[in-house]
Image (cartoon, helix red, strand yellow):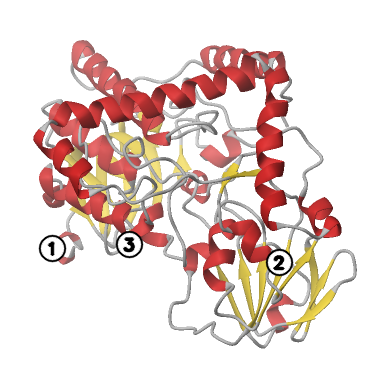
């Protein structure tokens, strides 16, 4: 906002990011009676991941009524698994309903934040000016910085190159030869969406994923009317969805022997569309289901079976002019390369911009691995917490559940500061962080997961 450009202000809380985590934090602050806060957003609108990711076919693989705030139920979700445009509209609605816009500074990217040990505050430099805050809530999210691989020759490619999270909607894919690099959650939505448009699609698959059907359907007008008239039915629906997913995770963590049945479902899903034995073998993972994120799609395999699609069972290793080359030597001439290669999750760029009490950046502190007490507080960074921090990712349910849990932690944190009174700061003890991380790692080992 232009009125903030030359203004230095001090606030009780600065929230970084306006996706689910940042907007959720803002709502919680207001509900706690705290109005002296700002939300710093680098882009020109709110929405975070659901603003940036607008690729064809973009949708959530968590049911809509579970992928929404418990304190802001939406009776009007149009589908059981809603698309990007509906989720983004929901976040805009939350922003308006809870009166958050006066607190939001758009086009205000955080360049650097430094802890002032004398004044017990964070000094924050943004692209729109300076400010300081008693407490910082970092809600930049793990899916905010696209990750492009370092592919030899890519800089000389004469065609179009972009990441799935930076989709170029001005580039028409119709009739083009396209290379899709990656087979993650974004790629399996992009492939069926663009396959009918392109002349040829070459998919580079480094590691195949287990894919289960996505049981998606429109939510009827009668259902939506019922949810509006009787709000408790929305809560019941959410609770049922939550319960089913909790039962699923019990199978993964306590009864892994039962996963063979789930694998058979995934193989049956593949077998219905993929008749070629060689392609079926290439698409079948060599690891137990659940070791990597299980993907949901009923259209991915049928798209791969179409005659204009080639699957290269290796990663992209080189680009020679307009020729893309797989690690297995497969070559293809293409007009465009689309990367669905994920995000900087364990090396978040924001960590380079946060300087703690000892003069070290968060990135330096996390050089040996990301660690935070309850996934929120990092030792040496007083009055600072992150939303969706280390070891908070979910593979079975909605991340909104985890976000709301961390918002409870934020509320407790601020209440404790009030109890202590005056100019005061809280910092996680290194021993507490180590103990928490050790507990997490030991529990993962108990379920056959090794930390790397």
Tell me if mark 1 has few (under 14), some (14-19) or many (20+) residues whose alpha carbon lies within 10 angstroms of its own: few
Q: Nearer the viewer, mark 3 or mark 2?
A: 2
Q: Nearer the viewer, mark 1 or mark 2?
A: 2
- Residue 290 visible in this rendered orientation of the protein: no
Comparing 147 with 422, the one in front is 147
Q: Secondary structure at mark 3?
A: loop
Tell me if mark 2 has few (under 14), some (14-19) or many (20+) residues whose alpha carbon lies within 10 angstroms of its own: many
The answer to whether 393 is drawn above or below residue 201 in the figure is: above
The answer to whether 96 is drawn above or below residue 258 in the figure is: below
Residue 338 picture quarter: bottom right
N-terminal label among 1 and 2: 1
Comparing 35 with 393, the one in front is 393
Report the disc number at residue 3. Answer: 1
The residue that disc 2 covers is 203
Residue 93 image point, x, y percent: 18, 50
Comparing 200 with 332, the one in front is 200
Residue 377 image point, x, y percent: 44, 25
Residue 187 picture quarter: bottom right
Asked if labels 2 and 3 touch by Cβ distance under 8 angstroms, the answer is no
């Amino acid at each position: 906002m232009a009125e903030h450009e030359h203004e230095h202000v001090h606030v009780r809380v600065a929230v970084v990011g306006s996706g689910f985590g940042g907007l959720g934090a803002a709502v919680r602050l207001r509900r706690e009676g705290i109005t002296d806060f700002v939300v710093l957003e680098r882009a020109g609108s709110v929405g975070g991941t659901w603003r940036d990711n607008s690729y064809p076919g973009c949708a959530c693989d968590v049911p809509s009524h579970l992928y929404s705030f418990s304190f802001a139920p939406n009776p009007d979700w149009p589908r059981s698994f809603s698309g990007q445009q509906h989720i983004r509209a929901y976040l805009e609605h939350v922003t308006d309903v809870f009166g958050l816009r006066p607190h939001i500074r758009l086009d205000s990217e955080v360049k650097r934040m430094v802890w002032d040990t004398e004044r017990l505050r964070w000094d924050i430099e943004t692209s729109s000016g300076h400010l300081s805050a008693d407490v910082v809530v970092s809600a930049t999210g793990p899916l905010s910085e696209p990750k492009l691989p370092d592919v030899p020759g890519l800089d000389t490619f004469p065609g179009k190159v972009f990441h799935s999270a930076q989709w170029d909607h001005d580039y028409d894919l119709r009739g083009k030869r396209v290379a899709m690099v990656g087979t993650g959650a974004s790629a399996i939505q992009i492939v069926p969406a663009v396959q009918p448009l392109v002349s040829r699609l070459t998919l580079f698959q480094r590691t195949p994923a287990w894919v289960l059907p996505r049981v998606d359907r429109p939510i009827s007008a009668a259902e939506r009317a019922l949810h509006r008239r009787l709000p408790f039915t929305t809560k019941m629906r959410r609770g049922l969805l939550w319960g089913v997913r909790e039962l699923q995770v019990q199978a993964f963590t306590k009864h892994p022997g039962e996963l063979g049945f789930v694998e058979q479902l995934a193989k049956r899903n593949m077998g219905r569309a993929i008749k070629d034995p060689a392609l079926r073998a290439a698409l079948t993972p060599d690891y137990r289901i659940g070791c990597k994120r299980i993907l949901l799609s009923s259209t991915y395999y049928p798209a791969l079976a179409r005659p204009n699609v080639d699957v290269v069972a290796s990663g992209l290793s080189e680009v020679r002019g307009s020729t893309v080359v797989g690690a297995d030597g497969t070559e293809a001439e293409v007009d465009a390369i689309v990367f669905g290669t994920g995000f900087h999750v364990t090396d978040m760029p924001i960590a380079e911009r946060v300087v703690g009490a000892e003069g070290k950046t968060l990135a330096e502190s996390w050089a040996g691995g990301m660690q935070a007490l309850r996934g929120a507080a990092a030792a040496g960074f007083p009055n600072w917490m992150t939303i969706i921090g280390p070891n908070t990712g979910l593979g079975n349910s909605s991340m909104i559940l985890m976000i709301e849990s961390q918002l409870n932690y934020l509320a407790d944190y601020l209440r404790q500061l009030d109890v202590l009174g005056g100019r005061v700061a809280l910092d996680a003890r290194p021993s507490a962080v180590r103990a928490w991380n050790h507990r997490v790692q030991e529990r993962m080992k108990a379920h056959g997961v090794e930390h790397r």
